[in-house]
Amino acid sequence: MCGLCGEIRFDGGQPDIAALERTTDRLAPRGPDGRGLWSQGPVALGHRRLKIIDLSDSGAQPMTDPRARLAGVFNGCVYNYRELRDELRALGHHFFSRSDTEVVLKAYQQWGTGCVERFHGMFALVIVEQDTGRVVLARDRLGVKPLYLSATTERLRFASSLPALLAAGGVDTSLDPVALHHYLSWHATVPAPRTVLKGVRKLPPATVRVVEPDGSHRDHRYWHPAHTRRPEYAGLDADDWSDAVLDALRTAVRRRMVADVPVGVLLSGGLDSSLIVALLADEGQEDLATFSVGFESEGDEEGDEFSYSDLVARHFDTRHHQLMVPSDRVAGALDGAVRAMSEPMMSHDAVAFHLLSEQVAKEVKVVQSGQGADEVFAGYDWYARMARVPRPRAAEAYIDTYSDRSHADLAAMVHPDLLPGHDVSAEFVRAHMATEGAETALDADLRLDTLVMMADDPVKRVDNMTMDWGLEARVPFLDHELVELAAACPPGLKLADGGKGVLKAAGRKVLPRRVVDRPKGYFPVPAIRHMAGPVLQRVRETLAAPEARARGVFREEYVAELLAAPDAHRTRRGANTLWQIALLETWLQTHGIR
């Protein structure tokens, strides 16, 4: 719900309001319903509003509280804002709006930075203490809402998207070799705090950063759930666990219906999105709008799963919408999807989400989506392989299974000036796996994916693609209480039944068996997966462009080898290698980075 930005000066100067206006304007797709700027002394804030809660002008941002001497901007939704407002009223606070933004300001006044631990929701927020000049930045536990940073010794700028920071100017746009290593090792995932650009960083999920007027800052990580067995669940059997998961998911779905506008569902027809529809039906939700997308087949690969989404829509009597995309539209649609990307994302379902979001935004402003269930409940087939090893070997199993390629392979791809001298991606994995709080190898795998990797792959993809059309996506499988429950669930229950066993058991209680027991699906875009027709032509043009040649990220002989056999070179997990390198260069060119 919205886009935020701002600038803090540390050198005694005034914020660059013209730069802030450019940043704010670049965020317009995230907030088409309103625009605001605020400035005092060394701090300025900008905001674009998507009206979801309190549709009146009382909810406009940046918001100031004259009594508390606070100003702030907020992106996301605090689902329990009504309960918190009642609690704060009982403590003597007075409210001038019905917005969750004002609840955030009052909560900060009452509880300080600890307020974030009381929020159920997704959020990025910035609060300015007008009297002290101190600025507080925070991000939700799972990193559903983004917050990008561009810092120099003179100032700090921040925004909800990386392209918005580029619009302000003054960003070091040279490539970060460590981030590039991550990108090529983990199918385009670059975990916080890095991005592929040296001059842009991300506030990590579950982090509060307090910035002092002199530019010094301190970070506090306020949530880090243990992936271990907990005494309070010791007596639960498999059926008890499926009941507990279903109850927690029901609560998560109910929370995400909080809005002053209708809420729909992105329905793929898979287990995760179908469960959301089923639980909303159980809650008595009527006239629920559901949405699905499909693509033309290529290379004998089916491009839609309408048979399953239609089955769920009929079973629960939803108001269903289908979008079928012909292959000749994919290349053109790719341009819009890449423009919407805060960072390069190689997963081709980004195109699907972008096209679907365009249509969905014509019907509703808010949707629930099933992202995150596979990482939280071990739904991918590679988890079983990684789980077979003893806990001390978890890091090596993760590296061997999850990585796209080895460090040695990267040396054959990347120009030497952009290649770190050692395997920084493997080093990153080993460091995370070595920390306490994960009992088994699977616990360690899921902790790394859920708390680190997921925010910068599926979660970021959904946020970027939906918000580019002024559509807010809510993800109940990333409800922090559900994630805490799943983290405590015995690994065997998650691995059962080919993965997501405990979730499938929950699903059989509310869904048709055919939906639960179907083969695992995804958002397929065959024209990209197989480098077909116009997409391949676009890739060739991108890699032959003067900007690509001048940048020289990849060795020319390697690129030539890929172009000679576009569909032959695959990562360890089956993704098209040509697409991975072409997407990076496409993103750089699209955003004017030279």
Image (cartoon, rainbow, N blue to C red):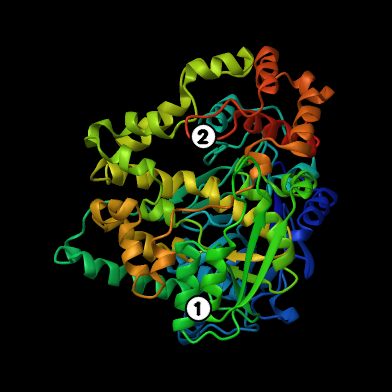
Q: Position of residue 156 (x, y in %)?
A: 67, 44
Q: Position of residue 65 (x, y in %)?
A: 65, 73
Give the side of residue 490 with respect to residue 191, left or right.
left
Q: Assess disc 2: are there few (<14), some (14-19) or many (≥20) residues with their C-alpha within 10 Å of its C-alpha.
A: few
Q: Earlier in the sequence, mark 2 or mark 1?
A: 1
Q: Which quarter of the picture shows residue 154?
A: top right
SS at mark 2 in the image: loop
Q: Is residue 303 visible?
A: yes
Q: Position of residue 576 (x, y in %)?
A: 59, 32
Disc 1 designates what residue? 315
Name the mark nearer the viewer: 2 or 1. Answer: 1
The answer to whether 319 is drawn above or below residue 292 in the figure is: below
Q: Residue at x 31, y 66 (%)?
A: 505
Give the side of residue 297 with respect to residue 427, left or right.
right
Disc marking residue 21: none
Q: Residue at x 53, y 84 (%)?
A: 285
The answer to whether 71 is drawn above or below residue 66 in the figure is: above
Type of the residue with mark 1? His
Give the side of residue 93 with respect to residue 384, left or right.
right
Q: Residue at x 42, y 50 (%)?
A: 450
Type of the residue with mark 2? Gly
Question: Which one is nearer the viewer's eye here, 432 or 339?
Answer: 339
Give the side of residue 388 with respect to residue 182, left or right.
left
Question: Which one is nearer the viewer's eye here, 470 or 4?
Answer: 470
Q: Assess disc 1: are there few (<14), some (14-19) or many (≥20) residues with their C-alpha within 10 Å of its C-alpha.
A: few
Question: Which one is nearer the viewer's eye here, 440 or 95?
Answer: 440
Q: Which quarter of the picture shows residue 396?
A: top left
Question: Which one is nearer the viewer's eye here, 411 or 290?
Answer: 290
SS at mark 1 in the image: helix
Disc 2 designates what residue? 574
Quadrant containing the N terminus in the rendered view? bottom right
